[in-house]
Amino acid sequence: MRFIIILCLLQVLTACKKTLITPVLPLLSFYQPVDFPEPVYPLAQNPVTREKFELGRLLFYSPVLSLDNTISCATCHAQTHLFADHNVAVSSGVGGLTGTRNAPPVFNMAWQPHFMWDGGVNHLEMFSIAPITNPVEMNETMLNVINKLNASDYWKKQFKAAFGTDQITDQQLFRALTQYMLMIVSDGSHYDKVKRGQASFTADQQAGYNLFLQKCASCHKEPLFTDYSFRNNGLDEISADDGRYLITQLESDKGRFKVPTLRNVLLTYPYMHDGRFFTIDQVLEHYSSGVKSHTNLDPSLQNGIPLTADEKKYLKRFLETLNDYELMSKMELSEP
Ligand code: HEC
Ligand code: HEC
């Protein structure tokens, strides 16, 4: 008996000693909400681990990826705005240069089959090269980024902890950033709680939900609030930005853009690919009375979506239920 106790005590002591030498971080795995479809991202190729996720988080918040070490991914994708840009139609990158498109929120990326307003990138792991090398975003070269990281003892230590190697590569950088993005899952809104039977809609919210199902859900499809198709919703008769056409060169794709998610939509203004609308009221007014004819206008919008003042109010009450305040304040995703 005494022998067993001593043995146990010894085990406890050595366990303590081990944790003192190498602190073991709590385990982490990809989070799949029960009512979401299977992710499209091939998780088996880049299984989420705590160490790689934490490295991705450090990188997402670090300006080291930009030419003059001033801009991080989080500069344009802020957690307080559900990982969209703050209050600006188009974002400023290195040297204050601006692009032409509104920065979309980065969450539920594991379910998204293509990225950017025109779907120009179709693998999340290949995505980060775009902002890093874009002259109006981080304006850096991959070679330079990798050299900067390899020259730093701090980053070498971080990459070693995640990947176990001494040489930092592009692929490790992309995979770590991807893991951080994969873990940004938005499923904590009031709407989600209603769907899970943990809360209920008010009468106004329910009326808005019914209207939404009739008038909006054909494109903004539940549960992700997009069907990921490319459509023209009648913003202009002639679009300044050719959208999907830039990728496919098909006339029928001119002026079409990816249907954006409406999760957290009230928190991610301004709206549309160029950030032209600052309020949700302007968006509803657009659908109600502002839809312009365009060769590629979606057939379902030929007559717009006429809405009465009450209908607009109810729709807004419903859209508010898509705010995910849990994600907005999730410590695990915040600046390390
Ligand atoms: C200067 C601002 C800026 C910076 C910095 C920036 N982004 Fe973005 N991001 C944008 C804009 C603008 C778009 C939309 C681009 C488009 O559609 O052409 C975008 C799009 C995205 C998307 C696609 C989302 C979707 O729904 O299609 C992802 C993912 C993303 N960024 C991740 C990142 C990562 C990771 C970094 C850092 C390596 C980063 N961004 C740095 C502005 C920025
Ligand atoms: C025919 C498909 C279609 C229908 C129906 C539709 N939308 Fe859209 N919606 C789109 C497309 C496409 C965009 C992006 C257009 C762009 O930026 O060029 C968009 C953009 C939006 C945006 C901007 C989101 C952002 O992050 O920038 C909001 C808000 C929105 N729609 C709400 C609604 C509401 C509310 C309804 C119903 C009254 C509705 N939509 C009906 C296709 C549709």
Image (cartoon, rainbow, N blue to C red):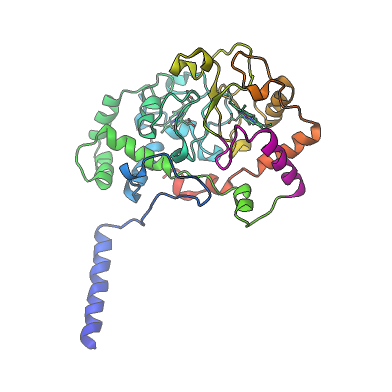
- Where residue 284 sits, quadrant-wise, is top right
Seen from the viewer's position, the closer of residues 221 and 151 is 221
Image side of residue 78 versus residue 233, left or right? left
Q: Identify the residue shown where x is 34% and y is 32%.
A: 64
Q: Can residue 326 be seen in the rendering of this structure? A: yes
Ligand 2 visible in quadrant: top right
Residue 101 falls inside the magenta stretch = no
Q: Give the left or right position of residue 321, taking residue 39 as reference.
A: right
Q: Which residues lie in the magenta part?
A: 202-226
Residue 159, compared with residue 218, is above or below; it is: below
* 110 up-or-down from 273: above or below: below
Report the residue that reaches farthest toward the bottom.
1
Estimate the x, y position of residue 238 in percent, counting from the top left.
Answer: 60, 11
Instruction: Give the percent coordinates (x, y) of residue 180.
Output: 40, 42
Going 68% across and 16% down the picture, which residue do you hit? 292
Residue 46 appearing in the image = no
Name the residue: 59% across, 36% down.
262
